[in-house]
Amino acid sequence: MNQTKSAAVLVVDDHPMRTLGMVHIVERFPYVTAVAASTVSALYAAAVRLRPDIVLFGPVCLPDGEPATFTRLRQLTGGCRFITYDDSTHSRVNPPNVSAGLCAFLPSMATPEDFDRAFSAALAGFTYFPQDLAAELIHGRIQFPQLSPREQEVLNLLSGGLSNHRIARTLGIKETTVKMYVTQVLAKLNVESRLQACLKARGLEAAAA
């Protein structure tokens, strides 16, 4: 993606070779201005030093569990976002973690191009999940009577982690039409951002305030 804003990235993994591989991939991206690595035990101290925009987690156990670790990291850094890479897609991708800032999942076979797309999406305020995971995240969404059927459909896809482009492809409509629906959804739900709309769709209105 073009015009991606600059970012500092913290790679968190307890496996040295895997950490080196992740750092090597991330530091190739021109918009990444700083890269640091940390073990889980030194996670919070490293986050305070670097104040990363993105924290990239390997398949590790988080110090305070999930999503409490995400919440604390966002407090320490002023609002970083999280990407996870793992062999198991279901180990960390769930609505509470997405609400706490998890914005992308990358499988162990992901290419550098996949990492670039995930990072660019995260920095733009979007999410990047495989379609099957996005579909699972859609289940259990609240239905809002003030929304038209199409607006509800757009909200479901939006809260499932799809970008405007992917929503347009899924529904077979133009991306400009998706933007129009998103604007209408925000107005009808009385929220100011896509994130707040997603949280409200998951029944987390207090977090969206």
Image: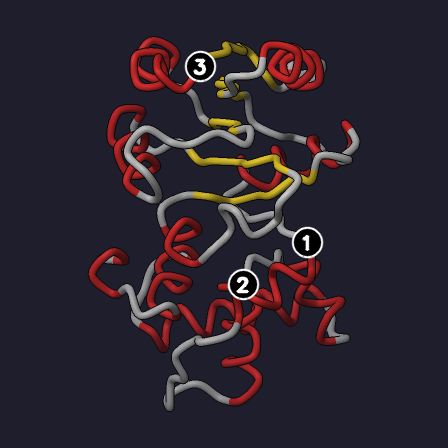
- Above or below: residue 147 compared with residue 90: below
Q: Would residue 156 be seen by someone viewing this image from the given angle?
A: yes
Give the camera-side residue of 186 and 8: 8
Q: Would residue 9 be seen by someone viewing this image from the given angle?
A: no
Provide the secondary structure element on which disc 3 rests.
loop
Q: Which kind of residue does numbered mark 3 sit on?
A: Thr
Provide the secondary structure element on which disc 2 rests.
loop
Name the residue beneath numbered marker 2.
160
Q: How far, Cα to Cα, is label 3 from label 1?
A: 27 Å
Q: Which kind of residue does numbered mark 2 sit on?
A: Gly
Q: Residue at x 45, y 26 (%)?
A: 53
First of labels 2, 3 by sequence position: 3
Q: Residue at x 66, y 66 (%)?
A: 167
Q: How many marks?
A: 3
Q: To which quarter of the image does residue 32 belong?
A: top right
Q: Position of residue 169 (x, y in %)?
A: 76, 67
Q: Position of residue 128 (x, y in %)?
A: 62, 47
- Above or below: residue 99 compared with residue 68: below
- Above or below: residue 130 compared with residue 135: above
Q: Quadrant of the N terminus?
A: top right
- Above or below: residue 161 compared with residue 60: below
Q: Nearer the viewer, mark 3 or mark 1?
A: 3
Position of 22 compared to 91: left or right?
right
Provide the secondary structure element on which disc 1 rests.
loop
Q: Position of residue 202 (x, y in %)?
A: 37, 68
Q: Residue at x 40, y 49 (%)?
A: 97
Q: Position of residue 209 (x, y in %)?
A: 22, 57
Name the residue beneath numbered marker 1.
130
Name the residue beneath numbered marker 3.
39
Q: Residue at x 54, y 32 (%)?
A: 59
First of labels 2, 1 by sequence position: 1
Q: Which kind of residue does numbered mark 1 sit on?
A: Pro
